[in-house]
Amino acid sequence: MSYESYEQIAAEPESVQQALLGSPDPVERVWAVWALGSRLGEGAAPLLNPMSEPHPGVRQHMVRILASLGRRRHVEVLAAMDPDAEVRTDACDYLLRTASEGQIEATLSFVSQRLFDGRDHELTVQLLPRLPPELPLIRASALNRGLRSGPKRVRAAIIFYLTSRRAQVDRARALLHRHLERETEPELITAMVEHFGADVDPALILSAVRRAPAAFDLLWSLHRTHGKLPWAVVGPLAEAPLDEPRVKLGCLHLVEDWRAPGARSWLRSVASETPEPDLPSSNEPGLSRRESERRASEADLQMWAYHTLEEMLLPTIIRRKVSAVARWIRPE
């Protein structure tokens, strides 16, 4: 007999429900699991054997029932050993959801070990976004381990986790602040800087752009949040040997005083740089978008460098002309 709904199986005797745990249809097995859990409560736990269940979807439902019944040891085994990442994720998730106040610290320790042992990246990526924001923060040492040695998608999951914390915000921000000093992926750097807003040291942002020049858009954000900056802060990035004209252009707009030692000489060097004469224009057909944007940025950089030099030299030129006219009108 085939069943069309959970209600049909729930109406069957217990013996039929137990027999349906061996049904070839995984949907019927799921319905039987829930029917037995509803009927027997704690008494259903000995009947559920996730380790012998071949379908991961059925094991996920067993996890939820076993966790709700307090069979935490069974769920911990699945969290550590199940071959399916979604089952492991559900097991960790429900261990945390069903933990009592006295169990939460030990459970967080157990889950942290699973998350950041370096062998289960899929669990880390799937579980961290699902953790309730009111939970205490996972141990800083475990998070730091993931941020230091995890692949990009693991670091992205940790950064999302930390930026969404409502509990222990200061600790989360401190971890992000330290990681900003070493992250190299432009989009992850951008996510952290946007989270901090104006509450971040400009030198830290400039250092991050030096490591990841593709994050040059952060320089415009920095200009909006902090305005102009001293050459002593901007100079190390401006003078770095980076093949990204948009970084230099961003630096040019950040400098507050071109009279600082080294600032004007850098500006003159930028203004004097000219493209090779045989290079095609930025809108040449067949040119890649990246190369086209780079050449357009080089042209913008030179234009702004010349414009800035003109603004600086204009008062001097006017004074000289006025002096020359005065001498002509009233010779000595």
Image (cartoon, rainbow, N blue to C red):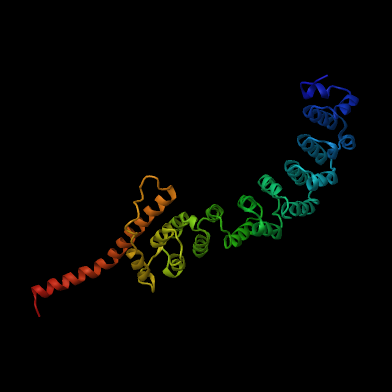
**Looking at the rendering, in which quadrant would you find the N terminus?**
top right
The residue that appears at 9% across and 78% down in the rendered structure is: 331
The residue that appears at 35% across and 70% down in the rendered structure is: 264
In the rendered image, residue 281, in percent from the top left (x then y), is placed at 34, 51
- In the image, residue 321 sits, relative to residue 101, either above or below, namely below
Quadrant hosting residue 238:
bottom left
Between 60 and 151, the one nearer to me in the picture: 151
The residue that appears at 76% across and 35% down in the rendered structure is: 57
- In the image, residue 265 sits, relative to residue 225, either above or below, namely below
Q: Residue extending furthest front?
A: 278
Residue 174 relative to residue 1: left or right: left
Residue 286 relative to residue 35: left or right: left
- In the image, residue 40 sits, relative to residue 214, either above or below, namely above
Quadrant hosting residue 310:
bottom left
Between 22 and 287, the one nearer to me in the picture: 287
| Mark count | 0
**Looking at the rendering, in which quadrant would you find the C terminus?**
bottom left
Residue 26 relative to residue 200: left or right: right
In the rendered image, residue 99, in percent from the top left (x then y), is placed at 79, 47
Q: Residue extending furthest bottom?
A: 332
In the rendered image, residue 191, in percent from the top left (x then y), is placed at 55, 52
In the rendered image, residue 330, in percent from the top left (x then y), is placed at 9, 76
